[in-house]
Image (spheres, rainbow, N blue to C red):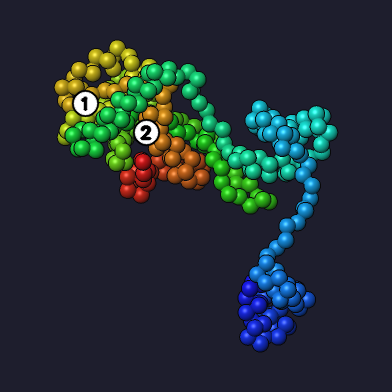
């Protein structure tokens, strides 16, 4: 803007006209032109300013971030610790800015079973899946991921943009449970079955029987170690499925991140299902049927 003002002045524009275009006062424009005449291009640059003194030293900042990591849910505790140990009065808003400066962000905490994982078994499962995926890319096999999930009128509450003065409220009530058994591959080809009753090994076996009858090439089915997937009834059918071209691949215990269909359940619960679905059991049923019927079409996931 200052450079433009200098050019306009050299073309004969008056100070009042330049000030109007630049939306600055006449005295400011005059100062720009005088600085240009006296100092050249350096006169158009901002000079360094002292600014407000820092409230925390570098060492105190480092300690504050350590306390935030130890107590990530409450900045008030950290503010109190700073006041007690360093006699520094700090507002939570200032501490939030400090957290952002150190690449921290306020976001939802995730449940994790990683502490129960066996690193060796996890890595073995990961490498086995990587080998299968390479064969799938060569169009030699299909790899599908299988799992169950349940939906009721008690919603999973996601984050959402809302007016400051208004909070979005979602209906919540007790209801029957809709259980979904799904088969999905990395191309988002998806098959599902919905049940209102309890899911047992017999139900799972019946669903896999139905899925195996439609296979067109050797297929590997990735599953977790839920009790209904490791029962005697389930294990008795593994050889039969293998004869039909379906091989069961068991994941390492406590490794849900390796089962890609978990991403689908999360997308449905936190993004795709509308809030209106929780108004009644029929609305929940209708919305779920619509979503499940359009996975891979209207609703897609891009697996990298």
**In screen coordinates, is 266 left or right of 48?**
left
> In terms of secondary structure, where does tag 1 sit?
strand
Mark 2–mark 1 Cα distance, whole angstroms, equals 18 Å
Residue at 37 percent across and 43 percent down: it is: 301
Question: From what the image shows, is residue 150 above or below residue 41?
Answer: above
Using the image as rendered, state which of residue 60 and residue 104 is in the foreground. 60
Horizontal and vertical percent for residue 126? 35, 26
Residue tagged by mark 1? 246
How many residues crowd around disc 1 within 10 Å: few (fewer than 14), some, or many (20 or more)? many
> In the rendered image, is residue 159 in sight?
yes
> In the rendered image, is residue 282 in sight?
no
Residue 91 falls in image quadrant: top right
Using the image as rendered, state which of residue 52 and residue 44 is in the foreground. 44
Residue at 37 percent across and 23 percent down: it is: 123
Give the number of the disc on residue 139. none
Horizontal and vertical percent for residue 59? 72, 34
> In terms of secondary structure, where does tag 2 sit?
loop
Q: Earlier in the sequence, mark 2 or mark 1?
A: 1
Residue 87 falls in image quadrant: top right
- Identify the image quadrant of the N terminus: bottom right
Residue 28 falls in image quadrant: bottom right
Residue tagged by mark 2? 260
Residue at 39 percent across and 37 percent down: it is: 264
Whether label 2 touches label 1, CB < 8 Å: no
Residue at 52 percent across and 36 percent down: it is: 156
Question: From what the image shows, is residue 296 above or below residue 125?
Answer: below
As drawn, the residue found furthest toward the top would be: 232
Question: From what the image shows, is residue 259 above or below residue 298?
Answer: above
């Amino acid at each position: 803007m200052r450079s433009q003002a200098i050019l306009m002045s050299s073309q004969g524009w008056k100070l009042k006209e330049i000030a109007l275009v630049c939306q600055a006062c006449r005295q400011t424009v005059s100062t720009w032109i005088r600085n240009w005449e006296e100092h050249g291009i350096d006169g158009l640059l901002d000079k360094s300013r002292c600014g407000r003194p820092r409230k925390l030293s570098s060492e105190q900042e480092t300690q504050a971030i350590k306390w935030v990591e130890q107590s990530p849910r409450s900045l008030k505790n950290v503010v109190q610790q700073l006041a007690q140990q360093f006699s520094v009065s700090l507002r939570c808003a200032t501490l939030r800015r400090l957290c952002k400066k150190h690449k921290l962000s306020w976001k939802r905490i995730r449940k994790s079973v990683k502490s129960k994982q066996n690193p060796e078994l996890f890595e073995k499962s990961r490498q086995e899946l990587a080998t299968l995926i390479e064969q799938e890319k060569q169009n030699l096999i299909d790899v599908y991921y299988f799992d169950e999930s349940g939906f009721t009128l008690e919603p999973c509450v996601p984050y959402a943009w809302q007016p400051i003065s208004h909070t979005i409220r979602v209906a919540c009530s007790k209801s029957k449970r809709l259980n979904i058994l799904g088969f999905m591959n990395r191309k988002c080809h998806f098959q599902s079955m919905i049940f209102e009753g309890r899911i047992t090994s017999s139900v799972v076996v019946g669903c896999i029987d139905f899925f195996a009858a439609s296979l067109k090439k050797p297929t590997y089915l990735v599953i977790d170690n839920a009790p209904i997937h490791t029962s005697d009834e389930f294990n008795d059918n593994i050889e039969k499925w293998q004869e039909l071209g379906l091989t069961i691949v068991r994941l390492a215990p406590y490794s849900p991140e390796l089962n890609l269909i978990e991403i689908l359940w999360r997308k449905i619960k936190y993004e795709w299902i509308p809030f209106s679905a929780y108004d009644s059991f029929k609305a929940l049923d209708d919305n779920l049927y619509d979503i499940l019927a359009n996975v891979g079409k209207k609703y897609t996931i891009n697996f990298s």
